[in-house]
């Protein structure tokens, strides 16, 4: 049992849907106060209502994580509402699929800004609060796609997710001065609204290629984030963990069929 989350102020970017909503719910169930940062109001409101219905504390702030002013406003609003910022879960991300031959420079920039620059902006905006408290936690949502695997259509996405891990290592060194750790969770295929958009066939094929024979649940990622955010993980920084049901392990189709 982890003992250190109750009453903490937690930002979850992209907390209105999918993995972010799962992370938000896991933290809220542990007694944390959760700020959901996303662009769409309807889903953000619904996520807050869901958390409150489960007995948790949550609020939302409409935010574009790719925009510096917007991120700064969101972090300040969180500190005002919850009396500081203890934990940042930088999770918001997009994964539009487009092959290189059709990919425009704008497609590339949009994915990089939303998935990678956002990690930098959110961490930077939280530093004054971590410095004031002399402690803090950051958990990035990266991916297996990019750092470990490839998938046609996701060159920009994979680069952004690898970029987060590059950012992580130097950020860990710099944040240590504020008693703050930063680590990353690398999800495999997690069942979310975003993934559902890729279609039934994709979901079926993916589940069949995973040794544990199921897509991940959003709580699987929330629980890993919760551990990194706990006091008990206080000596772990600059690290990453794959949470994928064993998806990256098989060497070949035969290896999966042997199970
Ligand atoms: P999702 O269901 O599509 O949810 C994405 C969330 O991010 C939404 O809350 C969305 O809200 C928010 N968001 C997107 N762009 C934003 C922006 N510019 N500013 C603020 N919020 C923004 O996606 P998901 O599957 O949960 O993915 C979440 C994270 O997990 C991403 O970083 C993704 O790369 C990573 N991941 C997912 C999987 C998977 O299998 N699902 C696997 C590996 C990694 P608004 O659109 O309203 O802003």
Image (cartoon, grey):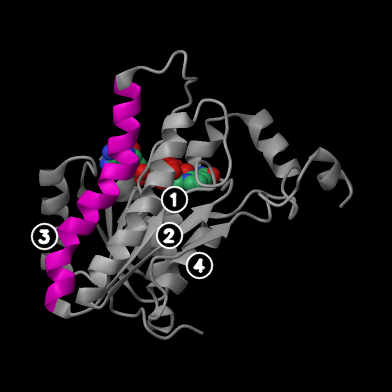
Question: Label 4's element?
Answer: helix
Residue 99 in view here:
yes
Question: Label 1's element?
Answer: loop
Residue 84 in view here:
no
In three-dimensional space, the C-alpha distance between marks 3 and 2, rounded to whole angstroms, equals 24 Å
Image vertical order of residue 5 relative to residue 24, above or below: below
Q: To which residue does mark 3 refer?
A: 76
Q: Residue at x 42, y 86 (%)?
A: 3
Q: Residue at x 39, y 40 (%)?
A: 160
Range drawn in magenta: 106-132
Is there a contact, CB below 8 Å, between mark 2 and mark 4? no
Question: Label 3's element?
Answer: helix
In three-dimensional space, the C-alpha distance between marks 1 and 4, rounded to whole angstroms, equals 15 Å
In three-dimensional space, the C-alpha distance between marks 3 and 1, rounded to whole angstroms, equals 25 Å
Counting residues from the start of the chain, the first of labels 4 and 3 encountered is: 3
Where residue 197 appears, as percent x and y from the top left, is 52, 31
Hey, which residue is sitting farthest top in the picture?
102
Q: To which residue does mark 2 refer?
A: 184
Counting residues from the start of the chain, the first of labels 3 and 1 encountered is: 3
């Amino acid at each position: 049992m982890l003992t250190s989350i109750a009453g903490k102020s937690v930002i979850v970017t992209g907390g209105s849907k999918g993995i972010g909503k799962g992370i938000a719910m896991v933290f809220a169930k542990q007694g944390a106060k959760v700020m959901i940062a996303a662009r769409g109001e309807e889903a953000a409101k619904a996520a807050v209502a869901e958390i409150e219905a489960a007995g948790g504390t949550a609020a939302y702030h409409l935010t574009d994580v790719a925009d510096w002013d917007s991120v700064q406003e969101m972090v300040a609003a969180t500190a005002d509402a919850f009396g500081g910022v203890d934990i940042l879960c930088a999770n918001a991300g997009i994964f539009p699929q487009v092959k290189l031959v059709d990919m425009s420079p704008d497609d590339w920039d949009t994915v990089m800004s939303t998935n990678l620059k956002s990690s930098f902006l959110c961490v930077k905006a939280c530093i004054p609060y971590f410095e004031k408290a002399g402690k803090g936690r950051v958990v990035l949502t990266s991916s297996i796609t990019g750092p470990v695997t490839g998938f046609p259509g996701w060159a920009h996405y994979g680069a952004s997710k690898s970029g987060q891990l590059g950012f992580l290592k130097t950020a860990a060194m710099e944040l240590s001065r504020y008693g703050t750790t930063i680590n990353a969770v690398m999800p495999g295929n997690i069942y979310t609204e975003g993934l559902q958009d890729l279609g039934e066939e994709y979901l079926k094929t993916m589940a069949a290629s995973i040794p544990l024979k199921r897509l991940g649940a959003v709580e699987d990622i929330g629980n890993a984030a919760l551990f990194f955010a706990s006091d008990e993980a206080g000596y772990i920084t600059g690290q990453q963990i794959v949470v994928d049901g064993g998806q990256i392990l098989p060497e070949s189709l035969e290896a999966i069929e042997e199970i």
